[in-house]
Structures are given as C-alpha cells and as structure tokens.
Amino acid sequence: MKTLVLVAHPNITESKVNRVWKERLKQVEDITVHELYQKYPAGDIDLDHEQRLLTQHDRIVFQFPLYWYSTPSLLKKWQDEVYTYGFGYGTGNKLKGKEYGLAISAGRLEDSYRPDGPSRYTLEQLLLPLKATIDLTEMVYLKPFILYGASHIGEVEIEASAEQLVEYLTMEHQ
C-alpha cells in the first residue's frame, strides 16, 4: 500500500516530535513524505501537483502538531484548495475508498482531553471537523495515531513513538 504523509509543521527544524517522525518515515519503503511548509513557504499551493499526489497513493495521512485544537493553518488552506468538487467530493470523486489517517502530536497529557479536564473535550471530539470532511470525500477514516504529552517527553520516548508510527502506517487497517 502506497502511503502519502503530508507533514504540516510551520517550524519543523525546532520540532521535538514531528521532525523525528518525518525523518524516520523517510526511511520506509512505500511511504512518501511531503512537507507542506517546505514545498509552499509562501502558501501558494500547486493544485494539480497535490491532486496528482493524492491519486498516486492508497492511504493519505496528515501529520501535524495540534495547534489551537486544530491543524496548522497551511494544512487547512491545503484542504480548502485541494479537495475541490469533482475531485474530492461530488461527481467524479477520486478519493473514494482511499484510507485516511492522522498522526498528531499533542502537547498536553491525555488526561487533559476530557470533559472535566482543562481542554473540556476529548481529542476525538476536537477532530470531528476532519472526520466530517473525510466522510464527505468518502475516504475510510482510520483511528488516529496520537502522541499525548509531546512537550513533556524525552528523546527515548520520541524515538519509540516514531517506531510506533511506522508500525501504524505499515499495518493493514481494514
């Protein structure tokens, strides 16, 4: 299965987690790592290139740090521009049946994401807009890969999470 990982981190060189994940994923056969902020530093997205990449892969994964309970801004812009009618949904949907996953680093601990915690919502609830988008595109939504407490862990845990991410991305989900 060919997997496309869209890495969306505005400052990947300063990243504790996403940089390590990205470097590890580059070593895996059948995984294409596509860094949005590196490819589009000015935010001018090449629609044809992006749609071509999507059609060439069986599984699409968004990798990003949780920003204000959502995706970084360029990834949202990418969705707005790339998932066009006739390509991403509606007649002629080219994404139907592809697998869709999320690889998210969240700075807070998992206990923070509950109704009685500081975030007041579970991360699954906060991800509902992404899930709804994927339902519209008729892709198959996979259970997200989430690393909680990313700002509180050391190198050993980060390296271990990179190996777990590889396992997640190379396993059969259906």
Image (cartoon, rainbow, N blue to C red):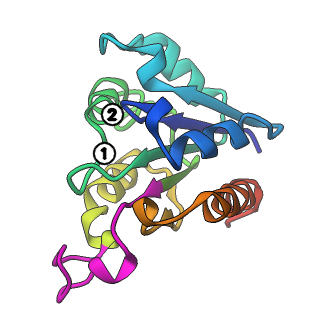
Q: Which labelled disc corresponds to residue 71?
A: 1
Asked if the magenta segment contains residue 118, the reply would be yes
The CA distance from mark 2 to mark 1 is 10 Å
Residue 91 appears at what percent x and percent y? 38, 33
Q: Which x, y percent locates residue 174?
A: 67, 67
Instruction: Give residue 3's position: percent from left, percent from top.
Output: 68, 40
Image quarter of residue 8: top left
Name the residue at 25% across, 34% down.
Answer: 73
Look at label 1 and name its amino acid: Thr
In the image, what residue occupies the spot 45% across and 35% down? 14
Looking at the image, residue 17 sits to the left or right of residue 109; the answer is right
Give me the residue at 20% from left, 52% from top. Answer: 68
Front-most of residues 29 and 136: 29
Question: From which residue to which does the magenta span run?
Answer: 104-122
Q: Amino acid at mark 2?
A: Gln
Q: Is residue 38 left or right of residue 86?
A: right
Callout 2–callout 1 Cβ contact below 8 Å? yes
- Residue 117 quadrant: bottom left
Q: Percent x, y for residue 137? A: 40, 45
* Label whose residue precedes the other's in the sequence (2 or 1): 1
Q: In this view, which residue lies farthest toward the right?
A: 29
Q: Which residue is mark 2?
A: 79
Q: Is residue 144 visible?
A: no
Which mark's residue is nearer the viewer, 2 or 1?
A: 1
Quadrant assignment for the N terminus: top right
